[in-house]
Amino acid sequence: MTARSAAFAVPGDLTTLTGGYIYDLRLLAGLRALGREVAHIPLGASFPDPTQADMDQAAARLAAVPAGCPVIIDGLAMGAMERRVLTGMAAPVVALVHHPLAHESGLPPDRRGRLHRNERDNLALAAHVLVPSPHVAGVLAARYGVPADRITVARPGTDRPLGRVLRADPPLILSVGIQMPRKGHDVLLRALALVADRPWQAVIVGSALDAEHAAVLAGLVTALGLAGRVRLAGRVRDDALARLYGEASLFALATRYEGYGIVFDEAMAHGLPIVSCDTGAVPETVAPGAGLLVPPDDPGAFAEALARLLDEPGTRDRMAAASAQAGAALGGWEGTARLVGRVLDRVAAEG
């Protein structure tokens, strides 16, 4: 192994279209583009609820990494691993926590408590911790006991939009997020029903990773009388998503919690005014003046924000300008990779 060698352990399919997997995939590619030898260590797809077979496989694969090679472990696996997996490693661990596992929506209190304790104890074994936002850094320092000097905020990079696309008519409301309770698409649908007297169309993009919740969303579209106006698009190709961003007049995500939210950066890169919720990292991610943030789980408040942007073209244009200005200032993925590379070098040197 060379001094610039590292490994990246990720559970499941790296090409899964979620913010966390996009981050992992782009970071891995960015590190390699900088000339680093970074081995991808695939872990079982059952994390964060690992089968014993996946846990044993993870233990074997991680134990095989030599002492001089730092290993980045994605938080889906890091927070759910048995302690023996980490103590059995010779290589130093760099945890990558997109958001703590215990912050997922809808968890029973006992499971939330177990996840918190396990992730807290595992993070104590990490040489360093990477997070995508100051919000997650603060949560880990305050609630998980991670020293602030062992945390580095490595914000996601942002791609620039390609060319210009005509806005759709009637105005297109775009939402992007996997179909699971935390993303709040059910709240968005109820809010859209409250502004049904106005001209608009809506597309919700995101894989149906939670099949039961996806069925609930499809049922809501029908029950709320939104069929024909709202399309649950599921997973779409990158070029199709870029076109939707270009055609949209505003971006809306009624999320219940975000550790960062890459989609907000994408929306600002396309100059879209944003309607979302005052929760998690959203207030520090959505630039001042670029959007309206309301309390989570409040369809009425979300509907009022949507109505304001639909009814007030001047307000929408001002927020679009602020969004575009903020989007133009966002950094690219190369900068993220360089920052993480410096962390890996420091961890390797400290041994």
Image (spheres, grey):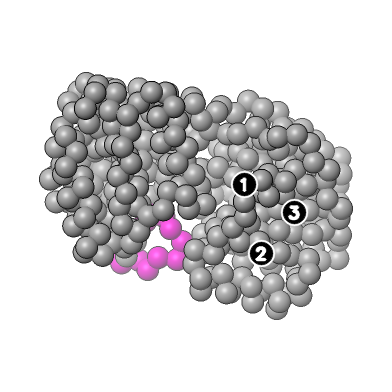
Task: Say which of 145 and 344 sits in front.
Answer: 344
Q: Is residue 1 above or below residue 11?
A: above
Q: Residue at x 20, y 23 (%)?
A: 350
- In-front residue for pair 78/113: 78
Q: Are marks 2 and 3 in contact (CB under 8 Å)?
A: no
- Residue 281, given in percent of the width and then of the height, sits at 51, 43
In the structure shown, which secondary structural element does the residue marked by tag 2 occupy?
A: strand
Q: SS class of the residue under badge 1?
A: helix
On the image, numbered disc 1 is attached to which residue?
238
Q: Comparing marks 2 and 3, which lies closer to the viewer?
A: 2
Under mark 1, the amino acid is Asp
Left or right: residue 322 versus residue 77 is right
- Residues in magenta? 101-110
Give the residue type at disc 3. Ile
Vertical relation: 63 (above or below) 226? above
Q: Position of residue 185 (x, y in %)?
A: 61, 62
Give the structural element (helix, strand or loop) at label 3. Answer: strand
Q: Residue at x 41, y 36 (%)?
A: 28
Left or right of residue 200: residue 324 = left
The answer to which of marks 2 and 1 sits earlier in the sequence is 2
Q: Which residue is mark 2?
A: 232
Lower sequence index among marks 1 and 3: 3
The answer to whether residue 256 is visible is yes
What residue is pinned by disc 3? 173
Q: Amino acid at mark 2?
A: Leu
Side of 107 where 82 appears, left or right: left
Question: In the rendered view of the protein, which quadrant contains the C terminus?
Answer: top left
Check contact, mark 1 vs mark 3: CB within 8 A: no
User: How far apart in space, not on screen, are marks 2 and 3 (Cα)?
Assistant: 12 Å
Query: Which x, y percent locates residue 154?
Result: 44, 32
